[in-house]
Amino acid sequence: MKYVFLVVLVVAIPVIIFWYTKDTTNHITIGFSSDSSSTTGVVSENRFPELKQNNEVKITARSDLSTQNPEEGDTVVLTIFDPALIPENSSFMGKPISFFPYEGNIISFIPIPIGKIGNQELTVTFKNGEKMTRTLYVQAKKFPIYNVGIPERLGMTASELIKQLADEKKELDMILSINTKETYFSKPFILPVGNAPVSGTFGEIRKTGSNEIRHLGVDFAPPEGTFVKASNDGIIKKAGFDSIYGNMVIIDHGNEVFSMYLHMKSVSVRVGDAVKQGETIGVVGNTGYSTGEHLHFSIKINSISVDPLRFISVLK
Ligand SMILES: [Zn+2]
């Protein structure tokens, strides 16, 4: 009987030690709530040996996601209220997201592309080893389909237009992939032509013959001669004429956030200029692939097009 008891002890003690160790090393929880209420986690000494001198080391990690159920084309804002937590690695839909300081917090714009519906996992690993995992449920959005012709003055067929758009995209992708790792803006973005009426919505499909072109910006129809204003502070990355986009401007706002202004009558900035929010960058026009006087305005985040109207409202 004595030997049986000893055998049980010999087997049980390592098992108990194993479970205890496993729990204290893996079970480090820092709460990340979807509202802005505070959640607190106690950090295990095993993971942070350098903090051993303190008897009670606590990290308060508060975060906020603007929504967990975004629609295609939305921008989700992740705010981390604890500046001591420095994001090191992140992933959403297989790509890293950018973080930047904003109003004393750390924020990230998470772009939701068109066509990736359902659960999508967001992970962020912080420098201190903490890991945050959240699931966003992306909802499908219904986009209208319109028949649009090609202006005669462009002198090209629908398939030539599609090919030219693909060529333009290569150049655009090069500009949009620049990550300056700097943040040039410190306040919410503004609309470039005030409260001008919207004449074309984000995501709508424009059919030219059998070809379909997805409209990845928003069109405004302000009165002729209206000045176009910079949506936020930034550096001009493109300024000039393009056969499809007409007179255009691209502003780099830092951390892979860009705004684009197309089809203008004229452009009044040059590549390399630093612009402030509200500064005039051009005049509304009807140049390039355009069937009437309007301003096309796009927002690109990490090279993904998002709905500019939703984007503008997300920081307010
Ligand atoms: Zn447009």
Image: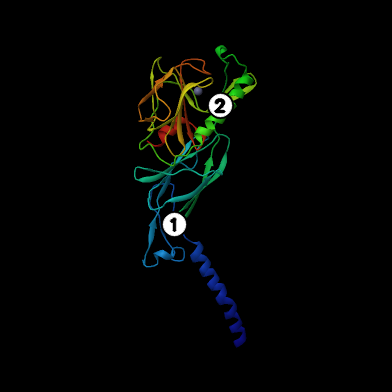
The disc, 1 or 2, on the residue closer to the chain's N-terminal end is 1
Q: How many marks?
A: 2
Specify whether residue 251 is in view. Answer: yes
Return the residue found at the far bottom. Answer: 2
Q: Amino acid at mark 2?
A: Glu
Residue placed most toward the observer, 127 or 38:
127
Q: Amino acid at mark 1?
A: Asn
Which quarter of the rendering shows the C terminus?
top left
Q: Secondary structure at mark 1?
A: loop
Residue 116 sits in which quadrant?
top right
| Residue 42 in the figure: left or right of residue 207 | left
Instruction: Please say if the residues under marks 1 and 2 sit with CB atoms less than 8 Å apart.
Output: no
Q: Which mark is residue 4?
A: none
Can the viewer see residue 194 in this picture?
Answer: no
Say the numbered circle drawn on residue 168: 2
Q: Distance from label 1 to label 2 (Cα)?
A: 42 Å
Image spot of residue 21 (x, y percent): 51, 68
Q: Residues within 10 Å of mark 2 (few under 14, many from 20)?
A: some
Residue depicted at x 54% and y 37%: 139
Which residue bears the numbered disc 1? 128
Q: Nearer the viewer, mark 1 or mark 2?
A: 2
Query: Dot 2 lies on which element?
Result: helix
Which quadrant of the figure has residue 226? top left
For the N terminus, the image quarter is bottom right
Q: Classify 260 as above or below 182.
A: above
- Where residue 257 appears, as percent x and y from the top left, is 45, 36
Q: In the rendered view, would you say 298 is above or below 31?
A: above
